[in-house]
Image (cartoon, grey):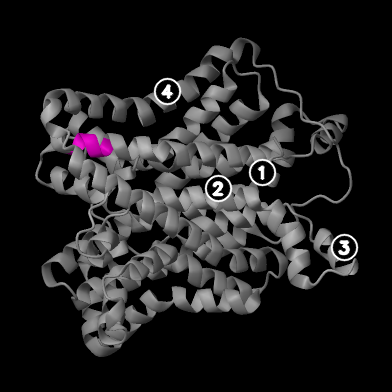
Amino acid sequence: MAIAAVAVSLLAMLPMAFIIWVAFQTGWDTVYRLVFRPRVGELLANTVLLVLCTVPLGIVLSVALAWLTERSDLPGARLWAWLSVAPLAVPAFVHSYSWITLIPGLHGLKAGVLISVIAYFPFLYLPIAAALRRLDPALEDAAASLGLGPWRIFFRVVLPQLRLAICGGSLLVGLHLLAEYGLYVFIRFDTFTTAIVDQFQSTFNGPAANMLAGVLILCCFVLLGIEVLVRGEERYARVGSGAARQSPPVRLGRTTLPCLLVPAFTALLSLGVPALTIGRWLVAGGASVWRLDEIGLALEQTLFLAVAGAVLATLAAIPMAWLSIRAPGPAQRLLEGFNYMVGSLPGVVVALALVTITVRVLLPLYQTLATILFAYALMFLPRAIISLRASIAQAPVELERAAANLGRSPLNALWATTIRLSAPGAAAGIALVGLGIMNELTATQMLAPNGTRTLALAFWAYSGEIDYAAAAPYALIMVGASLPLTWLLYVQSKRMAGR
């Protein structure tokens, strides 16, 4: 497993190695002038403020929704739980498209934070809700017997046990904020990613864009360091029978109506606005916007790439996810960081690195299916690792040791215990990666074989021409095609909790 994790991590380092190589060729003097300039400071301030505002708001919203849907007697809790996951089916740039066509003057940091929270909070809600379902109620009973009130029990007993889920979800959201492009282009909010794409479009392989990508990698290092410090090395699996029961739901009483407003208002902003906007443009466009031959081909190609790339990324994530739980340490954290760094890079940087490598070294692989699938596996590796890591963390290592003591080989012992117990996490990882691939834009444009036209590429082409009516069918089908993956993600998160 360690050898496989090292191999995957080295492959994940290819885009960063490409940036270092470009910097070496550019020369230190030029690098210094490109990095230490006011424009970089402005982009850094925008990106840092975006992360600092979005992640805490997403945590508060997700914890509130997860507690209401999993631990209270909220009316329609199962429906609200599903509606809290469903926004994942709406691509981030479709959220932005919906809001900007509804409110044309929506721009800047406030718009970026609003849409980012709406688009990405399910990445936090899912692991937090799954962790809440599996908490041992005996710990809360013990705290109550010692005289602690409900609020003190929540902050001293429940919240610390959610730390791994919150850290993993926050890291995933942070990486998305660093790498997102389409969302911020619509609202004209400049980040490192939008500036990098602009530079590449104007100069293709410009040193300025590569140096911006280098600063983005440093931002990723900071995120990883914070996540490691906050996560700690505590054990989250339980040995023994514990309390084989669920916590009784908390009665909301007079606060039922105000509590209902939280998931209802969230669903209105995250699902109602896109539904209203897409429906309005479909009505405005009429039957002429439904070009069935184009749409059918785009849907077929999108589904194939999503499924193949998701399976490949999840298989590649297994060694690193296992190592991060079973053998934590400085070397493991360094390897894990390599896997996360590529997830923070814009698709255009990963794509350009692979274009350069295939053209100069592996020309037969240039613009082939193998190259685009490899790019997807690298870009969405963090999603798969985080999903698997949370699932493996709750599989006691004693089961592996017991299987080995009964005569099974190490690999068989691993397969018979941890891998099978983490199957729900693997399914959740496949769904998460598939959703990401369905919405990917820039890497697909540069690496896909000639003639490839996915739903995202078609939507972007029409919306770039300000033909929002023609783009609406592709937005609708992207949402419809993503719903089964979102449902799978929701179901697997239930299975991870033994339900």
Nearer to us: label 4 or label 3? 3
Give the residue pinned by disc 3: 402
Separation of disc 2 and disc 1 at Cα?
A: 9 Å
Q: Secondary structure at mark 3?
A: helix
Q: Amino acid at mark 4?
A: Phe
Nearer to us: label 2 or label 4? 2
Q: Is residue 180 left or right of residue 74?
A: left
Residue drawn 87% across the image and 63% down it: 402
Q: Secondary structure at mark 4?
A: helix
Give the residue pinned by disc 2: 428
* Quadrant in the picture for the N terminus: bottom right
Say which quarter of the image contains residue 299.
top left
Give the residue pinned by disc 1: 496
Residue drawn 24% across the image and 29% down it: 278
Give the residue pinned by disc 4: 265
> What segment carries the magenta color?
471-475
